[in-house]
Image (cartoon, rainbow, N blue to C red):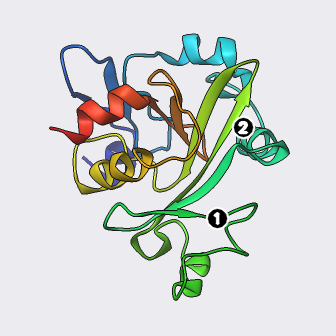
Amino acid sequence: MGRAGLASLLFVVTLRASESMTTICPARELITTGSVNRDEASIEFPFLATNVRGRRAAIKSFTHLAPEFVFWIGPDGTLHDAKDAHSKNPPRGFQHIVKDPPDYGGFLRGRIASQGGRQLIVVYCRADALAFPGPIVRQFVAGAAAFPVPVSDNTLVVSDNGDLYGTLSDLRRRGSD
């Protein structure tokens, strides 16, 4: 099979019996995993629907309008308050990470925002970073445990590109695998 054929393959992995299927496509389809499917998520957050144009801009607009909390999470899971902007408030001694997307020197960066009482956590990361059990999920879960604002277990967690990782509870389960 040639490169073009490989690029069109669709990989499907089941994470847990209680979670939906995780779908990843090298052609950059959106990842959807966890206990909330994309159709359900898009009822609360229309920019998460499958065929939305300008998704990234809509997510940015939503999270930048009135964020509840802006954060960095260090590789060791330490939570850092980024106040109102990641670029102005990187963790002390790590100013260089701002210029290292999407890996940010091993740090995760994100924002918590709400709409109509429903929260959304957006994490700026590689598409598959929070989709599968591993150290990055454990890093996120450790940092999330220290959020200084109330965060519901059913808060959706997504990437800045709209990849849907499920709820905070889904990530906690994934982080314990």
- Mark 2 residue type: Arg
**SS state under label 2:** helix
Residue 77 horizontal/vertical position (percent): 35, 60
Q: Which mark is residue 55?
A: 2
- Mark 1 residue type: Ala
- Choose top left, top right, bottom left or bottom right for residue 95: bottom right
- Look at 19% across and 22% down and name the residue there: 16
- Look at 22% across and 50% down and name the residue there: 134
Residue 89 horizontal/vertical position (percent): 67, 74
Nearer the camera: disc 2 or disc 1: 1
Q: Which mark is residue 82?
A: 1
Residue reaching furthest left? 177
- Look at 31% across and 48% down and name the residue there: 137
Observer-nearest of 122 and 148: 148
Residue 90 horizontal/vertical position (percent): 60, 75
Up-down: is 173 above or below 21?
below
Residue 153 horizontal/vertical position (percent): 44, 24
